[in-house]
Amino acid sequence: MVAEFGEPGVQNPVVIDLITLDKAADTVVLVMTEHRPWGTVPEQLTQQLTQQLKQQLKQQLKQIEEKVNRYMGYVLDGFLAEQYPQYLGKSVRIRLDCAEQPRGEAARFVDAMTDAIESHGIHFAMAVLPPPT
């Protein structure tokens, strides 16, 4: 499947990274993974490097936004229930697993994304999971 659709992660919007059931909450969880650190910009960097990091963060946030939109379409357009009829009628949560806590612009983006997702009746959660050592 990886050969056909590519690696999972927010950089690949055509792949649902993981679908699982939280039995305790009776909720279907669609997980998206972000293994890269957030493109934060430390103060001591040169102007050129700062611009590069800002561009990387902008691209990273755009990739997450596209992935979220695909996940929401998958749920709201009925594809989740069609492909997994056993999940019909269950609440849904989109979860972003990331390598570190977002800060600055990334944190504001996640807050806005949370509001947008939840306005459609889908729950959102974020889990900070450092990369395996």
Image (cartoon, rainbow, N blue to C red):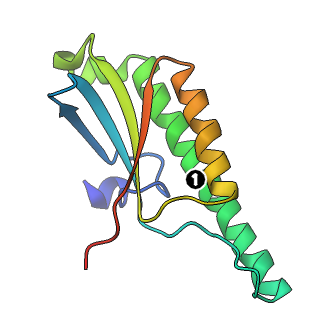
Amino acid type for the residue under numbered disc 1: Gln
Residue 6: which quarter of the image? Answer: bottom left
Query: Outermost residue toward the right?
Result: 47
Q: Position of residue 99 (x, y in %)?
A: 42, 65
Residue 105: which quarter of the image? Answer: bottom right
Label 1 environment density (alpha carbons within 10 Å; few <14, some 14–19, many ≥20)? some
Residue at 34% in and 61% down = 129
Q: Which residue is mark 1?
A: 63
Query: Considering only vertical position in the picture, is 36 above or below 107?
Result: below
Q: Nearer the viewer, residue 12 or 57?
A: 57
Residue at 26% in and 25% down = 27
Q: Position of residue 104 (x, y in %)?
A: 68, 59
Q: Position of residue 117 (x, y in %)?
A: 53, 28
Query: Considering only vertical position in the picture, is 114 above or below 65?
Result: above
Query: Considering only vertical position in the picture, is 54 above or below 34?
Result: below
Q: Nearer the viewer, residue 84 or 133?
A: 133
Tell me the quarter of the image containing the C terminus. bottom left
Residue at 32% in and 18% down = 91
Residue at 60% in and 28% down = 116
Describe residue 44's horizontal placement relative to residue 10 as left or right: right
Q: Secondary structure at mark 1?
A: helix
Q: Nearer the viewer, residue 71 or 124?
A: 124
Q: Position of residue 52 (x, y in %)?
A: 74, 77
Describe residue 28's horizontal placement relative to residue 35 as left or right: left
How many numbered marks are there? 1
Residue 50: which quarter of the image? Answer: bottom right
Query: Outermost residue toward the top?
Result: 89
